[in-house]
Amino acid sequence: SASLSVKITDIIKELMKQGIMATANQAISTDVAELVALEFGVELVVEVKKTVEEDIETEFKERERKNIQSRHPVVTMLGHVDHGKTSLLDKIRSASVAAGEAGGITQHTGAHQVNYKGHKLTFLDTPGHAAFTAMRARGANMTDIVILVCAADDGVMPQTKEAINHAQAAEVPIIVALNKIDLPGVDVNKIYGQLAENGLVPSEWGGDTEVVKTSAETGEGIDELIEAIELIAELHELKADTKIPAMGWVVESKMTQDRGVVATLLIKEGTLKKGDVILAGIGYGRLRTMRDSSGKVIKKAGPSIPVEVTGLSDVPSAGDKFYCLNDQSRAKDAAEQLKQLEREKTLSRRTNITLDNLFSQIEAGNVKELNLIIRADVQGSVDVLIKYLSELNTDEVKIKIIHAGVGGVTEGDVVLAEASGAIIIGFNVVPENQVKNIAEERGVDIRLYNVIYRITEELKDAMAGMLEPDE
Ligand code: GDP
């Protein structure tokens, strides 16, 4: 409005003429903006301004890579609580220590490098699938393979299903560890059936999901699990240049009283050395110390290796990228610009998709696929909703149900909704207050109903721009 010297209301009127019901502070696509500007006799030239970090990112992407070598896989364990994720990882780690690896003190760094009978692997310690997806939402696709841990005595549980959906949304290959196989009375076929129902058809049944029977108690199947990981890793030809200046991700970081900022970094490519100057989110600085995940002081590390470093100016966020720059002033400029941008971002949060703005977002070309998360009190209702809602596709919008499950709306649902721009539909369920607050804070729309046809009606109306506003 200001740069066209046209009143806001006139612009809104022009948008309405084009069938777009936008408010004054709503984003519209550049195509629409160009058309509207033209109506007022102005040619709009769209120029995307890049941040220093984006410049650095491009520069790093376009680097010449002459020393491509295979790297070891980065693995995340997901699954229902108490199904044995920690126990399996402990078993694998202790076997590695016994094999002569340094360390012994279990310290929490968010990532562990293990050497299991000569197989090198990195395990990420993400606290659940919500954190996994939150990281991915920031563009941190650190995980090469997900191990879905499913206890044989319990079978596929709600969080197992959630974990499957989160892993599939991330397009990461899944290996199932059918754990607690040592327990008596285990019905393997029943669980295979449950896995198959959720899109993971076991290879024993002719599908392409590797299911390994494991026991963190007896150690049974752990060798096979590691072999299955190696196999998938080989299949995906995990490779990286080992010589260029390093880049990768921040796994976690914190401010400590005695050592300043302590960050765990996972190297994606290149070599990171003590003394390197890095940019990591809003933090930058020369790396003062560097340790591997067993706490041993090291001087350099290569791809897929997690390291704990000190020397950063500020605490970066988990999921931020880091770049080895060796140019202190450039790193500082980029970090300061990021800090400024973050401040601005919290001031004007981007508009999420809600039922109320759905139509204008569709019209503005921002929505081609409507992602939904469905929650209901019983499985029968979940099935009915999936069926009915899938039938609401129109020429403009495709409905995509990215997650559906029995039970109340969870924090994981909200995180997944935020990351995927989804709306949450609840039938005969209510979210806990804490979940409601998080959703509000993040602008995620949770719609609650107790009559099924109201859901389909409202969605249809919203997609057609005929939704009655909430009073
Ligand atoms: P997490 O919540 O997925 O990390 O699960 P934990 O690793 O904490 O395991 C939960 C419980 O199951 C603990 O009491 C473990 O001792 C037990 N457990 C884990 N794996 C096995 C297994 O393979 N066999 C048996 N019998 N118990 C197990």
Image (cartoon, helix red, strand yellow):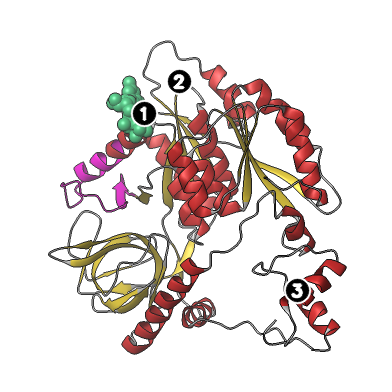
Q: Mark 1 and 2 residues: CB-CB less than 8 Å, in contact?
A: yes
| Point 25% across, 55% down: residue | 293
Judged from the image, the secondary structure of the residue bearing numbered disc 1 is loop
Judged from the image, the secondary structure of the residue bearing numbered disc 3 is helix
| Residue 33: percent from left, percent from top | 76, 76
Is 106 a magenta residue? yes
Q: Residue type at mark 3: give it.
A: Thr
| Residue 181: percent from left, percent from top | 40, 21
Q: Which quadrant would residue 331 be assigned to in this image?
A: bottom left
Mark 2 crowd level (few <14, some 14–19, many ≥20, 10 Å Cα): some
Q: Residue placed farthest to the left in the image?
A: 258
Quadrant showing the N terminus: bottom right
Q: Which residue is mark 2?
A: 154
- The span shown in magenta is 91-119
Q: How many angstroms separate mark 1 from mark 2 (CA)?
A: 10 Å
Q: Of the numbered discs in the image, which one, if any, rests on residue 9?
A: 3
Q: Mark 3 and 2 residues: CB-CB less than 8 Å, in contact?
A: no
Mark 1 crowd level (few <14, some 14–19, many ≥20, 10 Å Cα): few
| Residue 242: percent from left, percent from top | 40, 71
